[in-house]
Amino acid sequence: MHDLTFVHADAAHVEWQVALADCQRQLDTQDFLRQARLDHPPPLTLGWCYLSDYYALAAEAILAALQQNWPGVSWIGAVGVGVSASGVEYIDQPGMVLMAAPFPRESFQLFSGRQPLPPRSSAFIPHTALVHAESSTPDLQELLRELSARTATGYLFGGLSSARNRTLHIADGVFSGGLSGVLFGPEVELVSRVTQGCQPIGPARAVTRSDHNLLFELDGKPALDCILHDLGVERDAPVETMAEALSGTLAGLNSAADDAPVLPGRFGADTLVRHLIGLDVQHRVLALADMVAPGMRLAFCERNAAAARADLVRVATEIRSEIDHGARGSARGALYISCAGRGGPHFGAPHAELQTVRQALGDLPLAGFFAGGEIARDHLYGYTGVLTVFTGH
């Protein structure tokens, strides 16, 4: 692939016009330096625009300004309760992050409600896809599976828009509902990993009886009894005591075909963390915020900042090592989509999560947002981070 120098910018201001002008100055300066360094620099073709929800109502105006100032660049992105750049996060404040890359135009295609997926007979064969969506989209998990099946590798990465006012995503237009994003051909090389934010508090058990989202038995024992045992709560404790103990407890699910956790006490990348939404003391039943089927594996878990930090270091270091010791060239830019429940408030200090990424990857151009759900492969995750690094020579 030709030179893959990314440009990137981030800014925060109560007025989006001021933040956008600041970002555009940063991009202009970096693009000028890029062009001065190269004899025949390839044009920038794909841009990312992530906006904090303070700017959500101005999304159309921001996109129009980007398209006017950067003709020839296709823009994708989303709104989040926070956005992130290299070593920096903007959570609960006005902020925007922009990034652009000079991918060959034939190496990617945008998709949205206005731009359908290419037909299977098309000469363009998608290998991976960056996906933005919303949690209110009907049959979202099935749509992700269908899109995954349309790619050669099955690998999707992305996240769900999150906002207190207006959720939306961008693909050369501003959209609510459905899916949008960009399909990448084989020329666009990337390395991507999921980092977990929860830690098991008990053993992994087999689901032996369930119905839709109702969990009756684990390893042949009543589901409620299993979680009370893991939490150290008496079987005949008052309902209020049970409810209080369960309030911070989640369920980590794996299908029977998924990989087992890599180490005891740690979830593997396939684990899907879901909320507990109810209990029936009389019948010893739990209700989950997802379908659960016999044969699946389940471990009760809780959010854990130390475990999240350690797993993020592991994932970022693995990516760095794979790039350094492979034939992919060097890291050129990164996307990091993290759960809205993570960031500084969870990691203990402002910017701590993004600084952890930067320490492992270096001062790499990076854009991302804090999502209402994270996408990797054909799964919809929670409390995770999805780190993707683009490489090139």
Image (cartoon, rainbow, N blue to C red):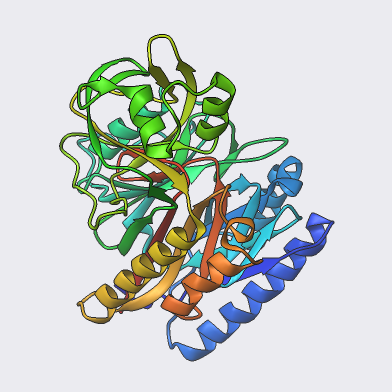
Q: Residue at x 29, y 31 (%)?
A: 146
Residue 136 visible: no
**What is the x, y in percent for residue 69?**
67, 62
Residue 337 visible: yes
Residue 217 shown left or right of residue 96 in the figure: left
**What is the x, y in percent for residue 286?**
41, 20
The quadrant of the rendering that contains the C terminus is bottom left
- Closest to the observer: 101 or 165? 165
All told, the count of numbered labels is 0
**What is the x, y in percent for residue 77?**
55, 50
Q: Is residue 141 above or below residue 365?
A: above
Q: Residue at x 49, y 75 (%)?
A: 358
Q: Residue at x 33, y 29 (%)?
A: 226
- Closest to the observer: 63 or 336? 336
Q: Can you name the residue that lies furthest to the left here?
A: 257
Q: Can you name the residue that lies furthest to the top here?
A: 282
- Closest to the observer: 188 or 44? 188
Q: Is residue 163 above or below residue 360?
A: above
Residue 353 shown left or right of residue 312 in the figure: right
The quadrant of the rendering that contains the N terminus is bottom left
Quadrant housing residue 117: top left
Q: Residue at x 46, y 18 (%)?
A: 279
- Closest to the observer: 241 or 219? 241
**What is the x, y in percent for residue 55?**
74, 48
Residue 221 shown left or right of residue 389 in the figure: left
Quadrant housing residue 211: top left
